[in-house]
């Protein structure tokens, strides 16, 4: 048995212990159960999932695939990285020229006007240090204070949902999905266009992605976009940066590999620079107060967060065992879906050995 086959079989033998149908055993599916009531419920659509699946690309070509690599499945927080990509699109278009500019300078009327929030910058939202305070489509940011997540080497100590004292924006790192959804809301208003349309036209179609992916919001997350140059006023849905409370990005493993390859190639696809190269490089720079994190990607600078991957690697990670591993040292992109997170480190180690052997 080859090293590559062994790594794939290892992944397939360690499926995440979530039911494939969310309705089969709702108490064992998703991450919303840890939230204080009444916020421990789904607010948007979800759907059945496939088996452990994935693809491996090396040197820009597909090396292997398993499971159902063309099935559009929910990705949970992998969608966060897509928000960083869209912010890069905005930067490239001149809509977001300075990430250190306060958000309120360009987006008004959605919750950045208070004395605390008016100093928050786009960069702080992207690195999860904003400490934004407020309510985003019915969910207060306090619901996700004291959040504990995998790969955080300094887990918070406190009761999730308690009103942890706020710090000055930029001085405290916290993985907080309400604040991520507020970033998405801000980008929606910045573009003046639904984010799924921007993602489709700016990135997915140029990358040759399928038409099977979708990005859904919460049932009540609708806003009125005013008329702008060339566009009539319209009603649009704000999409979340995950599936914490339902909705989110449903996409195939192969389409995720395309986005990973775009990052590996510095934002370039063929002869076209889809994202500014400096933006992509900045996404991989460590946050000063949380060096394990970049702009909505996880990093491995100490080599311990993702054993087996190089110190230059980066990861899109989502609950339920979703990993998009971007590995410059091996010129590779690996996508794994629905693998038990407890066994992800062993899979990464095995796959790193297989890719090294395949070089």
Image (spheres, grey):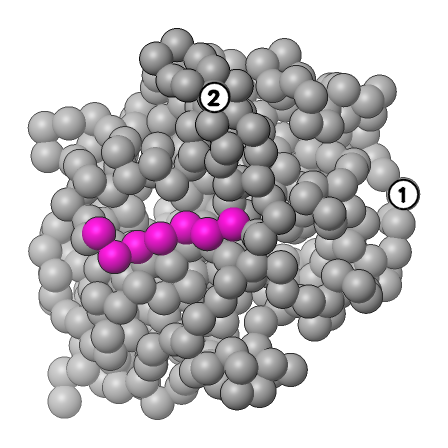
Percent from the top left, x then y, of residue 115? 84, 20
Dot 1 corresponds to which residue? 165
- Residue 318: image x %, image y %? 48, 61
Estimate the x, y position of residue 38 in percent, counting from the top left: 80, 63
Residues 171 and 47: in front is: 47
**The C terminus is located in which quarter?**
bottom left
Q: CA distance from mark 2 to mark 1?
A: 39 Å
Pointer 2 or 1: first along the chain: 1
Q: Is residue 104 above or below residue 3?
A: above
Give 190 or 126, whichever is nearer the viewer: 190
Mark 2 surroundings within 10 Å by alpha-carbon count, few (fewer than 14), some (14 through 19), many (20 or more): few
Q: Is residue 322 left or right of residue 209?
A: right
Along the horizontal axis of the image, is 22 left or right of 75? right
- Pointers 2 and 1 in contact (CB under 8 A)? no
Asked if residue 309 is positioned above or below residue 169 in the image, the reply reads below
Q: Residue at x 14, y 89 (%)?
A: 1
Q: Position of residue 274 (x, y in %)?
A: 24, 29
- Report the span colored magenta: 211-217
Q: Would residue 26 be found to the left or right of residue 68 on screen?
A: right
Query: Circle 1 — which element?
Result: loop
Residue 15 against residue 300 in the figure, above or below: below
Q: Does the magenta-highlighted stretch encompass residue 212?
A: yes
Residue 57's disc is none
Name the residue at 26% across, 68% down.
Answer: 71
Identify the residue at horizontal 85%, vertical 39% (top origin). Answer: 166
Please tell me whether residue 166 belongs to the stretch shown in magenta. Answer: no
Q: Nearer the viewer, residue 199 or 44?
A: 44
Q: Is residue 224 visible?
A: yes
Q: What residue did someone put label 2 on? A: 233
- Count of numbered labels shown in the rendering: 2
- Residue 291 appears in view: no
* Residue shown at 40% from the left, 86% from the top: 14
């Amino acid at each position: 048995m080859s090293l590559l086959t062994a790594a794939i079989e290892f992944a397939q033998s360690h499926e995440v212990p979530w039911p494939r149908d969310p309705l089969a055993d709702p108490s064992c599916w998703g991450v919303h159960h840890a939230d204080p009531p009444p916020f421990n419920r789904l607010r948007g659509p979800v759907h059945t999932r496939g088996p452990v699946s994935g693809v491996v690309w090396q040197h820009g070509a597909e090396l292997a695939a398993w499971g159902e690599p063309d099935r559009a499945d929910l990705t949970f927080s992998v969608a966060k990285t897509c928000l960083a990509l869209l912010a890069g699109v905005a930067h490239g278009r001149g809509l977001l020229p300075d990430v250190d500019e306060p958000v309120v300078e360009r987006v008004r009327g959605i919750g950045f006007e208070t004395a605390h929030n008016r100093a928050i910058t786009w960069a702080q939202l992207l690195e999860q240090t904003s400490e934004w305070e407020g309510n985003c489509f019915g969910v207060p940011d306090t619901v996700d204070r004291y959040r504990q997540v995998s790969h955080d080497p300094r887990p918070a100590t406190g009761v999730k949902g308690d009103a942890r004292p706020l710090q000055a924006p930029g001085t405290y790192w916290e993985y907080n999905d309400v604040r991520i959804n507020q970033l998405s809301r801000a980008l929606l208003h910045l573009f003046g266009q639904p984010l799924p349309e921007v993602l489709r036209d700016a990135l997915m179609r140029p990358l040759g992605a399928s038409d099977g992916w979708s990005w859904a919001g919460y049932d009540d997350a609708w806003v009125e976009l005013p008329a702008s140059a060339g566009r009539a006023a319209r009603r649009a849905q704000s999409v979340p940066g995950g599936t914490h409370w339902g909705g989110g990005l449903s996409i195939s493993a192969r389409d995720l590999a395309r986005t990973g390859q775009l990052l590996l190639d510095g934002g370039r696809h063929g002869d076209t620079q889809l994202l500014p190269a400096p933006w992509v490089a900045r996404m991989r720079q460590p946050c000063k107060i949380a060096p394990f994190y970049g702009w909505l990607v996880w990093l491995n600078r100490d080599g311990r967060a993702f054993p087996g991957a190089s110190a230059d690697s980066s990861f899109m990670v989502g609950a339920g065992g979703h990993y998009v591993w971007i590995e410059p040292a091996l010129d590779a992109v690996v996508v794994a879906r629905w693998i038990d997170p407890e066994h992800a480190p062993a899979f990464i180690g095995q796959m790193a050995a297989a890719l090294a052997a395949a070089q």
